[in-house]
Amino acid sequence: MAAGAGLSEVWVLVAHEGGAVRKITSELLGKARALAGGGRVVAVLLGAGVPDPARTLGRRGADEVILVDDARLAHYTTEGYAAALAHLAAEGPPALLLIGSTAQGRDLAPRLAARLGAAVVTDCQSLDVADGALVATRPMYTRKAIGTVRLGPGQMWIAVALPAVFPVPAETERTAEVRSAALPAEIRIRTRVVETRAIERETVPLTEAEVIVSGGRGLRGPENFPLLDALARALGAAVGSSRPPVDSGWVPHDYEIGQTGKTVSPQVYIACGISGAPQHLAGMSGSKFIVAINKDPNAPIFQLADLGVVGDLFEILPRLTEAVKRRKAVG
Amino acid sequence: MNIIVCLKQVPDTEAPIRIRPDGTGIDETGLNLVMNYYDEHATEAALRLREQFGGTVTAVAVGPERAREALRQALAMGADEAALLRDPQLDGADHLQVARALAAFITPRTPDVVICGKLSTDDNAAVVGPALAEVLDLPQATAIARLEVDPNRARATVHRELEGAVEVLEVPLPALFTVERSLNEPRYPSLPGIMKAKRKEIAVMDLAALGLSPEEVGSPGAVLERLTSPPGRTAGVQVNGAEPEAAVEAIITFLSERAKVL
Ligand SMILES: Cc1cc2nc3c(=O)[nH]c(=O)nc-3n(C[C@H](O)[C@H](O)[C@H](O)COP(=O)(O)OP(=O)(O)OC[C@H]3O[C@@H](n4cnc5c(N)ncnc54)[C@H](O)[C@@H]3O)c2cc1C
């Protein structure tokens, strides 16, 4: 809990896609509320033709929504978003701007910080205010250490927070007031978005999933990933992998979890046919619970699994999927 | 084509690290230090552009004396020149200060392309690249998985991996890119390359040589106060030698009663 009166104003950059507000935004609004105490929580929504967000964002804790609705913001671009936020901050910067650690958030935050002369910290897994400073903790050295980073007073702070570490706050009856703001006539956007190709995925995005079912070299080939897909569908989980399935072309690159892939922290991570190399652990050892299925009783993954099952995944997975389905049908 | 690649020397991720007892950093005694993994991909991307368009590749690092080794590797891979930016004021610098020092080196060299790794595996921040693009006033594309420059070098088409999508961007040059590992397969330094790299001079520049005053570099806005060990995880229950049905039962019980997701 933040001590003292709280920050006067905290902004949250709204992450949205196809008209829907992403889960990380709710997580950040909850954190913003806690840090602001009685101060103001402002959701900043940039886009073109976005649906009225006042209710959803208010319910999660925003007092106000600043809406910049402009054709030049129809697609995310670094310079478009940086210009919009710099313009808003020029009218009165917040103490803290929270941005979710998504591909766009990571692209934007450092650039904006350099533009505004703000202090920036990324990959935050905790955020507190102490003695007028923002104190963040973040995994470093491929999760072999946790760093405590201090952003001193007298400057604007930008914090990029990891998904799924701050809880989604309970809904309230609050409705945020919406204030529309305009972009300056002249902004320079040099990059052009040619297209955004969706990667077909049946399941939830990895970084937002409460449960992740992940497969390694033990899956033996692309033809066996449907075993994971089926279990994931039954659980409402996302599917990920260690690096070998990516390198062998069994699954797309965005499946990869670990040092050179994604960092995830779901409620449950189910590792199937994954040995538990340090580079893999770098991406998933922050999971709340770890379940490992591996036929080798000495696999390193068992050293950190809350539940380790020594066995053949080809025998276990189909039965597990059926058992989950049965249970869901009852419950 | 004038290409700059920014790189860093970091601890080998294969090896364990030792946190100093006072938590101020890691103990580097006996630690194997290597070129940051993504910077190998950045160097490879730079070399491929030179192979395609001609020109020079200059590798630059901010860091202590030991960072020469990473620069030496870039030279061995084929970079033409290398420079180490080293100054007491840069010890404990935050990422924005590092970006300002790099920019002071890069600006007078009027590059066509600046390439960085998407992050460095020691602090994992992914901040220097985009901050540097801002200081240089260049357009940027981060964590790119594909890079094509058109024959008249006016623009690049890049792919970025978003959550659940691939974004195709057109970026006018000069520009700054940070690279993802799927962009390429870094080459190993050849033996002649290693021999040649040994003879090459690595320029060392302090802030004065970069024409930066201490005020221009400023003081760090973000300070790493301490490092601690991550909360240890211990092995929980192991189910061994069970029939698949019993194993499944154990998982179901765990998912519903401990993890509460069922
Ligand atoms: C610089 C660098 C970066 C890296 N980054 C990453 C990264 O981001 N992510 C990552 O994952 N790796 C990464 N790696 C690779 C890493 O070192 C390991 O090689 C990799 O994680 C191993 O993947 P795996 O566990 O799937 O395969 P393996 O280590 O081969 O393990 C396969 C496991 O499957 C089990 N198995 C086989 N058949 C069955 C069966 N029928 N039933 C049950 N179990 C079975 C085996 O017992 C074994 O434990 C990186 C490596 C380097 C050098």
Image: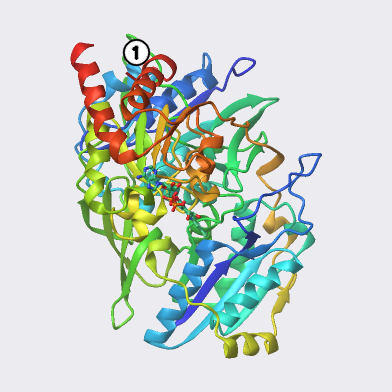
The reply to whether the residue tagged 1 has its Cβ within 8 angstroms of ligand 1 is no
Residue at the (68%, 72%) spot, across then down: B69
Residue at the (32%, 45%) spot, across then down: B163
Q: Amino acid at mark 1?
A: Glu
- In which quadrant is the N terminus of chain A drawn? top right
Residue A252: x, y in percent?
29, 54
- In which quadrant is the C terminus of chain A drawn? top left
Taking the image as shown, residue A173 lies to the left or right of residue A234, namely: right
Q: Quadrant of residue A66?
A: top left
Residue A114: x, y in percent?
54, 51
- The residue lying toward the viewer, choosing from A187 and A279, is A279
Q: Quadrant of residue A213?
A: top left
Taking the image as shown, residue B29 lies to the left or right of residue A101, namely: right
Q: How is the image coloured?
A: rainbow
Question: In this orientation, does residue A204 appear?
Answer: no
- The residue lying toward the viewer, choosing from A304 and B5, is A304
In the image, residue B179 sits, relative to residue A99, either above or below, namely: below
In the image, residue B103 sits, relative to residue A141, either above or below, namely: below
- Could you tell me which chain the residue with mark 1 belongs to? A
Residue B113: x, y in percent?
44, 73
What residue is pinned by disc 1? A171
Residue at the (52%, 74%) spot, across then down: B4
Mark 1, secondary structure of its residue = loop
Residue A72: x, y in percent?
26, 49
Question: In this orientation, does residue A210 appear?
Answer: yes
